[in-house]
Amino acid sequence: MKILALDSSGLVASVAVVEEVDGNQNLLAEYTVNYKKTHSQTLLPMLDEIVKMIELDLKSIDAIALAAGPGSFTGLRIGSATAKGLGFALEKPLIEIPTVDGLAYNLYGTDRVICPLMDARRNQVYTGIYEFCGGSLHALEPQMAVGIEVIAGKLQALGREVIFLGDGVPVFRKRLEEELMAGQKFSFAPAHLNKQRAGAVGALALQYLKEGKTVSAAEHRPVYLRLSQAERERLEKEKNA
């Protein structure tokens, strides 16, 4: 099995190719950029570079995986359009990986509770609570859009050691330190593991592919979890009209 994986759900743009042969997984290539450029400027050139570097025949892939949301509305649309275009052109299925699940998968094998935090603006985070059981990712709380105090409360109720990661960490770190109960152990993932990576999306997608969790390019829709700013403003105007 060979999977092309894309993640443009947040600040990071990432492309990877992951394969499994005789039960052994291998990350063939990964190109990740966290810089001041739009994903429309980076995603396709990164894909083109990977194709050249590993002499990849795109027809040889079995599926296209993507971080399907939540995340940046613009980033999700760019990733979705790219994946759908490739899916149609190559006649390949898509694998929709929940963005927060993919982020949590960066910390494969940890015995701590994993809490990804993506800055969702408006004092909210895209988050969830995860653990690994028998080598599989298990969601104690599936991905959601909530205030930082809500997820802190859920973690307090668990009372277990937590590791945080994601672009929401620098935004809400001080609030977390204030909200979490005194004595509760927590830490933060290191730089090479604390942002979205297409390699993690691809590795998780290998399991999805085995389970038959695919959709066609025509069926795919991004998962936003909440209304866009334009939609919120429209509803507010209608409410006040």
Image (cartoon, grey):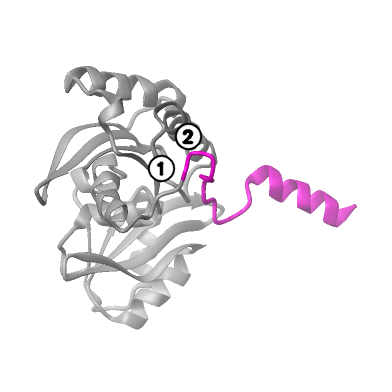
The image shows residue 179, relative to residue 50, as above or below, that is below
Q: Residues within 10 Å of mark 1 (few under 14, many from 20)?
A: many
Q: Secondary structure at mark 2?
A: helix
Inspect the image, locate mark 1, and give the three-letter code of the amino acid beneath it: Leu
Residue ID at (30%, 49%): 205
| Badge 1 vs badge 2, beta-carbon distance below 8 Å | yes
Q: Residues within 10 Å of mark 2 (few under 14, many from 20)?
A: many
- x, y percent for residue 149: 46, 69
Residue ID at (22%, 65%): 136
Label ID, residue 63: none
Q: CA distance from mark 1 to mark 2?
A: 8 Å
Residue 230 located within the stretch drawn in magenta? yes
Q: Indicate left or right for 170 with 231 as reference.
A: left
Q: Indicate left or right for 87 with 219 as reference.
A: left
Inspect the image, locate mark 2, and give the three-letter code of the amino acid beneath it: Lys
- x, y percent for residue 207: 26, 55
Which residue range is magenta in the image?
216-241
The reply to whether residue 165 is visible in this rendering is no
- x, y percent for residue 72: 49, 42
Residue highlighted by disc 2:
84
Label ID, residue 94: 1
Residue ID at (42%, 29%): 86
Tell me where residue 33 sits by quadrant: top left
Tell me where residue 180 sits by quadrant: bottom left
Give the camera-side residue of 82 and 163.
82
